[in-house]
Amino acid sequence: MESAMLIKNGRVINPTDAGGKPLSSVASNQSLDVRIRDGKISELENELKTKAGETIIDAQGCWVMPGFVDMHTHLRDLAQADREDICSGTQAAAAGGYTTVVAMANTDPPTDCAEILDRVIKRIHERALVEVLPVAAVTKGLKGVELTNMVEMSDMGAIAFSDDGMPISNLGVLRRAFEYARLHGRPIISHPEDHDLSHGGSMNEGMQSTCLGMKGIPSASEAACVAREIEVLRYTGGRLHFAHTSAKASVDLIRQAKAQGLSVTADATPHHLVLSDAEMMPYDTSFKMNPPLRSAKDVEAIEQALVEGVIDAIATDHAPHSKLDKNKPFDHAPFGIIGLETAFALCFEKLVLSGKMPPNKFLALITTHPAKILGIPAPQISVGARANIAIVDPEMRWHFEIGESLSKSKNSPFKGRALKGKNLITIFNGKIVYFDKDRAQRRIQEVCATST
């Protein structure tokens, strides 16, 4: 519960803004001490002297960055608290360096009315370790038929609207949703999938699905939905965000829509960036997600789109499921994997260590870009900013041991994977909410005597 803190010897990394320019007057990639008072950054200087009562964090060899923003998290809770709840989900988020997460609306019951949204908000206030921004459903019961009271829930604090997991096939309903969401400047977050094309499928349609004897989900099921929703947006105006983009054809459509000046944004997940269907372990449900892992050609297109800025952000799509459910036969097991604790390292290796982009541009994909899409203040390390900070050792090699995950669920294809780059300490509003005690020993000390 620290109110006074000094981070010493770290290297401050600030993200670029959405246009690729420096966000803060504080230059990125320089050694600075960071003093925190009353939940905000109060000083940024070289070799600040310690003061009485401060908690000192030695960040030698580490990057000091603004806390990450995940714009696609399933925190479950309510009737699915056995899979995840707001407390355990935000613990996992903090472990991954995230200080803001967006909670999707496909809870049980769905967040489709003021009563349920109020329950969710109260639980967030009572139990969350980091900032949680709730999403409300577009349609009642996620059925794609009747719109929710979007204006009322916007006034209550819904940050966006989405029927994630259940695409809206009725384009007349989608048209009205854009019109209502536009009243409050809220984005519609789309789960692009044509159920007629994907029905009954459990993995990507291709050589692997044929070899395994499984019904596949063609990439056209995503791209067809992207195409038709872009056309509705073109007619109505508003803001459209595509979640978990996975297919090259979708990327091409999004690139074209942006070139035409439409307000279209997109994110991609770490698993669609680093895994293809060829790397799936046969019949291992830890590799079952929706959209499914695509071809190597699609993976390459996702990477290039992130480098070019066609895809704006990286989001985890953290989707916890019970061991019992994931132990079902592949065709019957639910879609989804957890991802908050592995996201940084996976993407850091793929994009930064490979030389594809500098650290500050990569950091923008998980901070300033999602913040702009959501319409929230851009995270940054600067005087006066909220003290939401991730302290990461970029050189640390570690293994993701699934038994050590802070999520209630353990459904990850990355269990046991060797990784590089580890978040050690997460600070939210000036308080330490995560401390990797096994890997960050002797980094924190109390200074109680008056400094000289």
Image: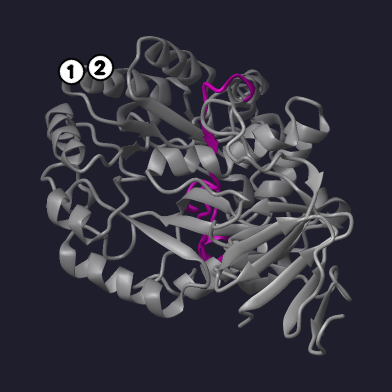
Query: Which percent across, then down, holds residue 96?
Result: 66, 58
Q: Where does label 2 land, which residue?
A: 231
Q: Which mark is residue 235?
A: 1
Tag 2: amino acid? Glu
Query: Which percent across, then down, holds residue 18?
Result: 51, 31
Q: Main secondary structure of the magenta part?
A: loop
Image colouring: one colour
Q: Secondary structure at mark 1?
A: helix
In the foreground, 114 or 429: 429
Task: State whether residue 103 is above or below residue 186.
Answer: below
Q: In this rendering, would 112 be left or right of 452?
A: left
Tag 1: amino acid? Tyr
**Can residue 4 be seen by looking at this rendering?**
yes
Task: State whether residue 152 is above or below residue 15.
Answer: below
Q: In this rendering, would 319 be left or right of 415?
A: left
Q: Is residue 320 magenta?
A: yes
Alpha carbon separation for disc pair 2 and 1: 6 Å
Instruction: Tell me the magenta residue range.
Output: 307-334
Mark 2 or mark 1: which is in front?
Answer: 1
In the foreground, 344 or 108: 344
**Can residue 336 be seen by looking at this rendering?**
no
**Residue drawn 58% across and 43% down?**
366
- Residue 424 is drawn in which quadrant? bottom right
**Residue drawn 28% across and 19% down?**
228
- Residue 349 is drawn in which quadrant? top right
Q: Is residue 46 magenta?
A: no
Asked if disc 2 and disc 1 are in contact, CB closer than 8 Å, the reply is yes
**Residue drawn 77% across and 34% down?**
352
